[in-house]
Image (cartoon, helix red, strand yellow):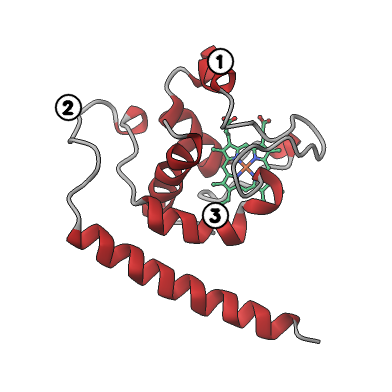
């Protein structure tokens, strides 16, 4: 069985990519200018997309697809298509970063979306990195 080896390789790759992401974050100025302070929950993501990509590739691709186009239905709503401008125009996503932050933190259990933050599987800083990467996927 090669699965455990692959898993180990994947985690090594993840650590390497995370380190890479961190050094990029250190070297490059932030892409977005600092926003005026609002409520923490509504603040725009200030994550590092490269670091987010490494996590996305391991924990999110299965349901959200490598390009973020989604459409995978498990038990409730299908995964959203982040490539589609209509997704972003939906009023429930008016404050998209806050909406994504809430979904990644608390999940959407009836639909099969994991409460990654609440269960401690993904740290708040990495949730910001994931949100930044979803913006890259969606090109917006
Ligand atoms: C087991 C499948 C599954 C996995 C794995 C998964 N998701 Fe989800 N995700 C879903 C489903 C299904 C929804 C739709 C929930 C709903 O709207 O009811 C969703 C919704 C979301 C949303 C809300 C977005 C929107 O515009 O509606 C975000 C953000 C999100 N997921 C991020 C992630 C991230 C980041 C990961 C990896 C850490 C991840 N998901 C892993 C199934 C999954």
Ligand 1 neighbours mark 1 (CB distance < 8 Å):
yes
Q: Looking at the picture, does residue 108 appear above or below residue 22?
A: above
Residue 15 found in image quarter: bottom left
Q: Is residue 18 above or below residue 96?
A: below
Q: What residue is shown at x 20% (from left), y 55% (from top)?
A: 28
Please give left or right for residue 86 compared with residue 79 in the image.
left
- 133 relative position to 39: left or right: right
Q: Which residue is mark 3?
A: 56
Quadrant location, ligand no. 1: top right
Asked which secondary structure carries label 1, the reply is loop
Position in image of residue 22 (x %, y %) = 30, 64
Res. 92 in view: yes
Residue of label 1 = 90
Mark 1 and mark 3: span between their CA atoms?
A: 23 Å
Q: Residues within 10 Å of mark 2 (few under 14, many from 20)?
A: few
* Left or right: where 84 falls relative to 34: right
Q: Residue 66 at x, y = what percent?
A: 62, 50
What SS does tag 2 mark? loop
Q: Nearer the viewer, residue 116 or 32?
A: 32
**Alpha carbon distance from label 1 to label 2:** 25 Å
Q: Please give the name of the residue rendered at 53% of the width and 42% of the height, measured from the top-left corner.
A: 104
Mark 1 or mark 2, earlier in chain: 2
2 vs 3, front mark:
3
**Residue that numbered label 2 is attached to:** 36
Q: Secondary structure at mark 3?
A: helix
Whether label 1 touches label 2, CB < 8 Å: no
Does the beta carbon of the residue at mark 3 sit less than 8 Å from ligand 1? yes
């Amino acid at each position: 069985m090669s699965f455990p080896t692959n898993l180990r390789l994947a985690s090594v790759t993840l650590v390497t990519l995370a380190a890479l992401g961190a050094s990029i974050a250190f070297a490059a100025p932030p892409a977005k200018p600092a926003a005026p302070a609002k409520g923490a929950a509504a603040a725009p993501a200030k994550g590092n997309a490269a670091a987010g990509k490494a996590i996305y590739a391991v924990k999110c691709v299965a349901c959200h697809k490598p390009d973020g186009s989604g459409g995978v239905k498990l038990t409730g709503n299908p995964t959203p298509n982040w490539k589609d401008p209509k997704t972003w125009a939906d009023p429930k996503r008016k404050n998209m970063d806050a909406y994504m932050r809430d979904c990644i933190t608390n999940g959407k259990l009836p639909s099969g979306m994991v409460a990654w933050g609440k269960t401690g599987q993904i740290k708040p800083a990495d949730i910001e990195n994931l949100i930044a990467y979803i913006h890259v996927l969606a090109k917006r």
